[in-house]
Image (cartoon, rainbow, N blue to C red):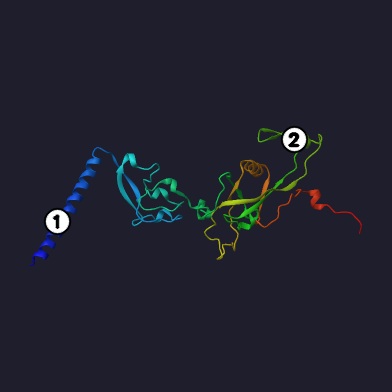
Amino acid sequence: MSRRTAGFAIAVLLALIGTAALAVYVNSAEQRALAGEELVDVYVVVAPIASGTAAESLGAGLVDVEQVPVKVRASGAVTSLPALAGQVTAVDLVPGEQLVTSRFVQRSQFTDRQAGVDIPEDLVEVTIELDAQRAVGGLLEAGQTVAVLASFDPLDQGQAVYTIDGELVPLPAAATGGPDDETPSSTDLLLRKVLITAVQALPADAAVDPERRLVTAPEDSLLITLAVSPFDAERLVFTAEFGTIWLAIERQTVPEADEPGQTRGSVLLTKVGPQ
């Protein structure tokens, strides 16, 4: 063996010895640091996990169990994967983070909201339940805008204060026309260009074409979440409680107009004039 070869072999051997010694030192230091610490098991993400991934598929290769000190366990850390049955990841998960319950939602709540619907910060979100015919046959999707139409039955104006579910609701003075007066049944355009932020997942057997338009209407009611101002949220909830709501897809190109609303009289009105 030449002197150069022998020197190279010795250098490699010393490097291996040094690496092993460093590993032993680091492991020893870690053990000293954890001495006296209570350790708990947590699930840690070991590979990228896309939003919408079913909890049932989070097995080996995606998450692993690691022991960490109690003080570094994340709030809401998942302690049992079976407990997440029926849920999906609400956001993308990255390697190294602990699995926490706040990162999961029910499968029916996961919608295109996670796919980029931008919700203005000054709006609140309200969910209403509608059957398919009142929700454009179930053709609604997150990111669309809709018009909200409100219908109300006649209201007895004979009392200045109206009782609704035990609550006294004062009527404006202008609305009280007389002791025997009733408001007509009415339908009005309540809100315009309202952003849909979420729609209840479709039934498993509903047929969908490549453009995501329904071929068969959903049999169950739809849960539709709308982004509105706090004031409009009150109007929307009141209508859902004491009237009926219809939605109409309203594209941004639809011109704004101050529609007067409709009553039985206006719908059936026949204009009389020169023939």
Which label sits in the foreground, 1 or 2?
1
User: Percent from the top left, x then y, of residue 200?
Assistant: 55, 53
Closer-to-camera residue (98/186): 98
Identified by mark 1, the residue type is: Leu
**Badge 1: residue crowd in 10 Å (few <14, some 14–19, many ≥20):** few
User: Percent from the top left, x then y, of residue 126?
Assistant: 58, 45
Quarter-of-image position of residue 10:
bottom left
User: Percent from the top left, x then y, of residue 240?
Assistant: 64, 44
Residue at 38% over, 54% down: 58
Q: Is residue 70 visible?
A: yes
The residues bearing labels 1 and 2 have C-alpha atoms spaced at a distance of: 92 Å
Pointer 1 residue: 14
Left or right of residue 18: residue 192: right
Pointer 2 residue: 172
* Quadrant housing the C terminus: bottom right
Left or right of residue 168: residue 272: right
Looking at the image, residue 158 lies above or below residue 141? above
Identified by mark 2, the residue type is: Pro
- Does dot 2 land on a helix, a strand or a loop? loop
Left or right of residue 176: residue 133: left
- Does dot 1 land on a helix, a strand or a loop? helix
Is tag 1's residue or tag 2's residue first in the polypeptide sequence? 1
Looking at the image, residue 234 lies above or below residue 4? above
Residue at 57% over, 64% down: 211
